[in-house]
Amino acid sequence: MNLKDFAYLAEVLRRRSGLLLTEKKSHLVQSRLAPVMRRFGFKDVGALLQELRHGHEALVSAVIEAMTINDSAFFRDRKTFEEFRDIVLPGLLIARSRSRRLRIWCTACAAGQEPYSIAMILNDAGLAAQGWTIDIIATDLSSEIIARAEDGLYSQCEVQRGLPIRGLLGNFTQEGDNWRISQNLRRMVTFRTFNLLDSFGWLGEMDVVFCRNVLMYFDQKTRTSVLKRIAEVLVPDGALLVGPAESVPSNIAAFAPAEQAPGLYYRSRPAAPLLLRRAVG
């Protein structure tokens, strides 16, 4: 791929998804686009990009999905889930004791490991049995990966990544060499294909937003825009959790970092968050 074609592809990705494609990642383009070329019958990347310039919408969507990173694991970056369970959740249970409803958004859910990990924590807390309504909204740019997440079927290798044996046996049923998520956890999660560049208006108010390991792939302008719009859907005492390599810029005044909890931000700082000291799993 010549520099002109690479620059065009990078601009399409930035404009349509917010994702940054730098020259140091140019070696990934051929391998990521190979399945798309086979699907649409192109002999090389040049032919694909030529058709892309004609505004072939199905091809544009396929290229964007192919260039999206969809790697995840159950309880990935375990510290984040500890912060959610031990700091965020206890405070919300007190604050929402009358409504008994929690709404949580996973902004880039990949194959569903993140929202299902959250569902396991809430299930272990016995909230459904106590009459709580749990709404976990899980979105991703890729329609193909959303379909996988909805199916809830994982390989032996996937369930071994971050999931303790107790969590596996208590929340999955084995189907041949694979494992399927239990129906009670599946019912907690609503999956939807969604582009973070689009309007958040359909979401309604959220108590917690997980926006992890996605902000790092945006340029500064897109990152700021996404964070400001997340702040608009978060309730006043809502919480935002970002990835370990991410942070909220100090010029976004809508968020306050939680003390001694990297990656955790509050829409406005709560008076006294409750900390319970125990480990996930």
Image: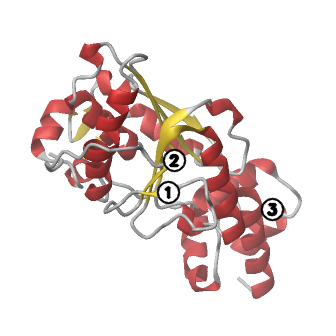
Name the front one of labels 3 and 1: 1
Q: Which residue is mark 3?
A: 52
Give the CA distance from mark 2 to mark 1. Answer: 6 Å
* Rendered image: mark on residue 256: 1
Q: Quadrant of residue 249?
A: bottom right
* Foreground residue among 84 and 185: 84
Q: Residues within 10 Å of mark 1 (few under 14, many from 20)?
A: some
Q: Which structural element holds mark 1? A: strand
* Foreground residue among 171 and 265: 265
Question: Residue at left 62%, top 29%?
Answer: 204
Q: Amino acid at mark 3?
A: Leu
Q: Which structural element holds mark 3? A: helix
Among numbered discs 2 and 1, the one appearing first in the sequence: 1
Q: Residues within 10 Å of mark 2 (few under 14, many from 20)?
A: some
Give the CA distance from mark 3 to mark 1. Answer: 42 Å
Q: Which scheme is used to colour this image of the protein?
A: secondary structure
Q: Position of residue 169 (x, y in %)?
A: 13, 35
Q: Amino acid at mark 2?
A: Ser
The reply to whether dot 2 and dot 1 touch (C-beta < 8 Å) is yes
Q: Position of residue 156 (x, y in %)?
A: 22, 48
Question: Residue at left 80%, top 49%?
Answer: 57
* Foreground residue among 1 and 73: 73
Question: Residue at left 19%, top 45%?
Answer: 276
The reply to whether dot 2 and dot 3 touch (C-beta < 8 Å) is no
Furthest residue in direction front, as rendered: 271
Q: Which residue is mark 2?
A: 268
Q: Amino acid at mark 1?
A: Ala
Q: Is residue 52 above or below residue 83?
A: below
Q: Which structural element holds mark 2? A: loop
